[in-house]
Amino acid sequence: MRIAGKASGERAPAGAGEDLRDLLRRIAARDAAAFATLSEQTSAKLFGFVVRILRSGDVAADALQETYVRIWEKAGEFDPVKGSPLAWMATIARNRALDEVRRIRPGSLEDQPEGFEPAADEIDPLAARERSERFAALLNCLQRLDEERRAVLLLAYYRGLSREALAKRFGRPVPTIKTWLHRSLAQLRDCLTS
Amino acid sequence: MTISPDDDFAAAEYALGTLDPSERAELAARRLREPELDEAIRAWEARLAPLSEAAQEIEPPRDLLPAIEARIRAGLPNPTQSAIVALERRIKRWRAAAIAASIVACALAIGLVAREANRRSTPREYVAILQKDAASPAFEVTVNLDKQELTVRPVAARAPPGKSFELWIIDAKLGAPRSLGVIGGTSRAASLSAYDPAVVETATYAVTVEPPGGSPDGKPSGPPVFVGKLIPVEPD
């Protein structure tokens, strides 16, 4: 499958938080037309998300279908106080992709990368131009982490890398990665609450 | 927050995605019966979610959106999930043997078939009757493969005083039995999203007697008192 990349921000609607909020409200009331608009506006964003974790266009397409079915079913649970509509949808997409990549089965998807080499197009959130307040706060806290440990967190988040894969990539034993993760996450939590 | 630091780390790694498959499955089961753990996972998801703003867009395949929309409008399951279709076929093959093994299961399944026919919108369900012997059905387990969800309903069994019933999924591929949660007096649901359909297919579903609130260490405290396997419920 050929997958064309597209820079963030080329489509204005995906970032338009108020519109998405309104669409989610209508979807909660079973408005199929609102659902069509929402999926059109957000599918490239969510597909970009799941395909980087799953690394197979076909598996990602299935995961995206499941994601939108969940969005359709759970739209009423969206709480604007807790975050943006896109963040809420991305969490659903990510969990769906992670459930897939961390299924209990012999062999793992990570053994069969297809098309998406982690090094190919690294995401650098620090370079993002448009930032919500929450995103800016999180980036501020991420910047206080040691560079290597920040990279570990970001690769886990955007690529869905397991502890084993991170250990291989950074040339450290798995327990070290686990310790790094715990320290970084604790630091992040404390930084965000302060 | 009243959960332990270890559990909070587990919640954080669950949200980040770095737990290994068995740890992830265990936490997915625990969050269903531990509201504080569930809350901790949600809090971590919310902390990390702003990172999604920086994700780059990639156009999905052109036929995907129409497929999703059609699926929503029809309220129908995803027909392209070949794994589930294959599973359905395999289950049908050993279905006759499973039914013959238990007259009670058969009778209850027929009841469900009738119910299904009246409520055509949920087509792909499977049922297991957990029992001690053919004369004493205790729990009815239904699995909806589209939603990757399991529902367990007590039919006749009552937990001994001061004890709880706990449901387990048991399969050689999983190693140790995995908890699907404590069963109370009414029906309740559990997520199967952490399990491969092939595991859901071959697994044995079992109930053990546990201390109140469930097994303290995540392992069955004793042998199963009720067991069963899935058979399909035909929508027509």
Image: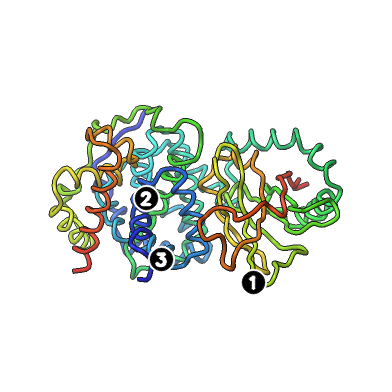
Q: Secondary structure at mark 3?
A: helix
What residue would you read off at disc 3? B39
Using residue A161 as the reference point, say whether residue B64 is left or right of it: right
- Is A21 in front, or is A33? A21
Q: Which label number is shown at residue B162?
A: 1
What residue is shown at x 31% (from left), y 56% (from top)? B49
Identity, as a three-letter code, of the amino acid under mark 2 = Thr
Do marks 3 and 1 share a subunit? yes
Q: Which residue is mark 2?
A: A42
Q: Residue B103 vs residue B188: left or right? A: right
What's the amino acid at mark 3? Glu
Which structural element holds mark 2?
helix
The answer to whether residue A190 of the structure is visible from this angle is yes
Residue farthest along the front direction in this orientation:
B222
Residue visible at 57% across and 43% down? B78
Residue A184 has which mark? none
Mark 1–mark 2 CB contact (< 8 Å): no
Element at label 1: loop
Q: CA distance from mark 2 to mark 3?
A: 27 Å
